[in-house]
Amino acid sequence: MKPKIFIDGEHGTTGLQIRVRMADRPDVELLSIPEAERRNAAMREDLLNSADIAILCLPDDASKEAVGMLEGNNSVRIIDTSTAHRIAPGWAYGFAEMDGAQADKIRDARLVANPGCYPTGAIGLVRPLRQAGILPERHPVTVNAVSGYTGGGKQMIAQMEDASHPEHIASPHFLYGLPLKHKHVGEMQMHGLLARAPIFSPPSVVSRRA
């Protein structure tokens, strides 16, 4: 029997990419919700509970809501692409190369949190140094990273692409995350085995006009 996979949020950017990549696979059955019904909570809940694997491509609050719809159902495996569960107890962090045991943890887990893009690079560099005892756990770590403006999410995309936006950004290079409370800091600290939060503010976002 083919495993049934439901992509909750399949009409968004991430969900569309996953659906396209899986569309031609003969070994799985994709469950789908019509775009017009994507806010139909009853239909979403039914599809979530009918799946063998649910892939959540949603904002944090919506991902938490989806997990709540599966409360008491221990047969559905969940892969969450949001930041909602990356440091949550009981969730496996989906970075298989993080250490020698991580691939097995992911394979055996019912709940898997997909890692963030920035943290993947940071953890991949910092964690081996921590495990080898080269980097003290309280060492002040700074993560310097650059991405295109799409890395800032829908709000930043709108600021960059919509000239009529009240907070339109015209500069090709700028700083954001200046309060040093970026949503990726927690997973960098936990999975990087750091005792203190790293300093992380994406220092420059380069627009397509650069």
Image (tube, helix red, strand yellow):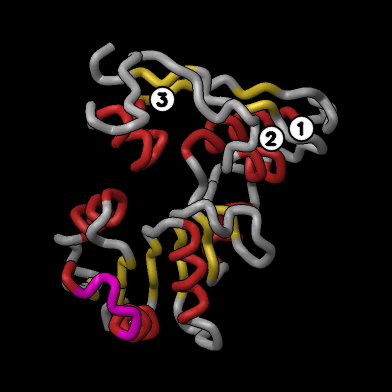
Q: Where residue 187 sits in the image (x, y, percent)?
A: 63, 44
Which residue has dot 3 on it?
147
Q: Nearer the viewer, residue 155 or 195?
A: 155
Q: Residue at x 52, y 62 (%)?
A: 112
**Which marked residue is nearer to the observer: mark 2 or mark 3?**
3
> Does residue 115 belong to the magenta stretch?
no
Q: Which mark is residue 130?
A: 1
Q: Quadrant of residue 4?
A: bottom left
Q: Where residue 64 sits in the image (x, y, percent)?
A: 51, 67
Amino acid type, label 2: Arg
Amino acid type, label 3: Ser
Mark with earlier residue (1, 3)? 1
Q: Quadrant of residue 5?
A: bottom left
Q: Residues within 10 Å of mark 3 (few under 14, many from 20)?
A: some
Q: Is residue 186 above or below residue 140?
A: below
Q: Residue at x 75, y 40 (%)?
A: 193
Q: Where residue 185 sits in the image (x, y, percent)?
A: 64, 38
> Judging from the image, what secondary structure is the residue with disc 3 in?
strand
> Judging from the image, what secondary structure is the residue with disc 2 in?
helix
Give the extent of the magenta segment.
37-42
Q: Nearer the viewer, residue 102 or 162?
A: 162
Mark 2 vs 1: CB contact within 8 A: yes
Which residue has dot 2 on it?
127
Q: CA distance from mark 2 to mark 3?
A: 22 Å
